[in-house]
Image (cartoon, rainbow, N blue to C red):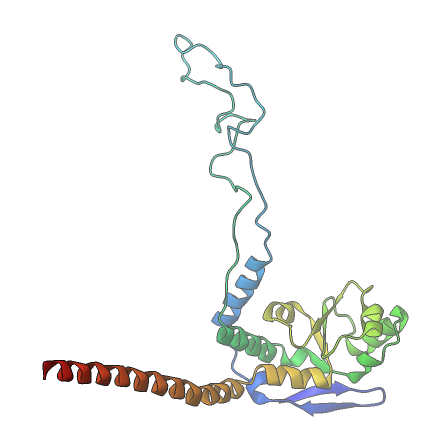
Amino acid sequence: MKLTKITATSKSSLTASDNVFGAEVNKVLLSQAIRIYLSNKRQGTSKVKTRAEVSRTKKKWFKQKGTGNARHGARSANIFVGGGVAHGPKGNENWNLKLTNVMRKKALISVLSAQVNEIVVSDEIMSLSGKTKEAISLMAKLAPQSSKVLIIINETKAEVLRSLRNIETILVVSASRVNALEIAMADKIITTTDAIKTIEERLDFTKEVKRVKKVKPAVEEVITKEVKAEVKKVAKKTTTKKVAAK
């Protein structure tokens, strides 16, 4: 996959992994991932008062019989204006949801493939000296007329963060922590060459397979030792029983 690369003097292309930036977009998984990220951003602190908590008189509203109205006690009932709320939020809701590691990686691959035309690679970002004016002029060249710009860098640099933090339309994240929601919400994605390599390494499934292969022999060795120990115990018990029988 060819990504657009812009330098100070020219415009070229950068070859990226097709497994990460040219994969088939899984819309169902991507939708699920975005819903989970949005759900996890909720605080769950919204709360209403029940009829026991509202500050209202508990005196009986009118006499029990003879008025032609339904019988009522306190005015704090939920059917009256100013009364409590029934079945409302209690302030302790838990909106946290989870994605497995494999699903999280595949969702990130899907959103990168879907937004591949909006990705621009430029190493000039890391040369910012800390002035907002420089950052604005650079953004005018890299992402003109973009209302939401996501900048992905490989390592945090104080001067770069200071240059970009006062621009409302820009969000700066690390390549090792960027998620599917941040990429999906961006109109333009600006990244560096090192950040592209970090993302490709992060989303490489072959490394997990190799790690599992390294663990397997160790597990087999432990199991073999435990089995041998159990066999020895059984053999000793059998020998002892035979000796006692004689």
Residue 172: x %, y % from top left: 73, 70
Residue appearing at x 23%, y 84% in the figure: 236
Left or right placement of residue 151 versus residue 211 in this view: right
Q: Is residue 180 visible?
A: yes
Left or right, residue 115 beside residue 74: right
* Quadrant that contains the N terminus: bottom right
Instruction: Name above or below for residue 67 compared with residue 10.
Output: above
Where residue 183 sits: x, y (%)?
64, 72
Q: Is residue 26 visible?
A: no
Residue extending furthest toward the top: 66
Image point 79% across, 73% down: which residue?
A: 144
Position of residue 79 relative to residue 150, above or below, is above
In the rendering, at what x and y percent does residue 128 appear? 86, 77
**Residue 5 in which image quadrant:** bottom right
Q: Which is nearer the eye, 238 or 51?
A: 238
Based on the displayed image, in which of its 4 quarters is residue 108 positioned? bottom right
Q: Horizontally, is 58 left or right of 225 in the view? A: right
In this rendering, the answer to whether 162 lies above or below 193 is above
Residue at figure coordinates x 76%, y 65% from the top left: 169
Q: Residue at x 44, y 87 (%)?
A: 218
Using the rendered view, name the quadrant where residue 40 is placed: bottom right
Q: Position of residue 223 (x, y in %)?
A: 36, 84
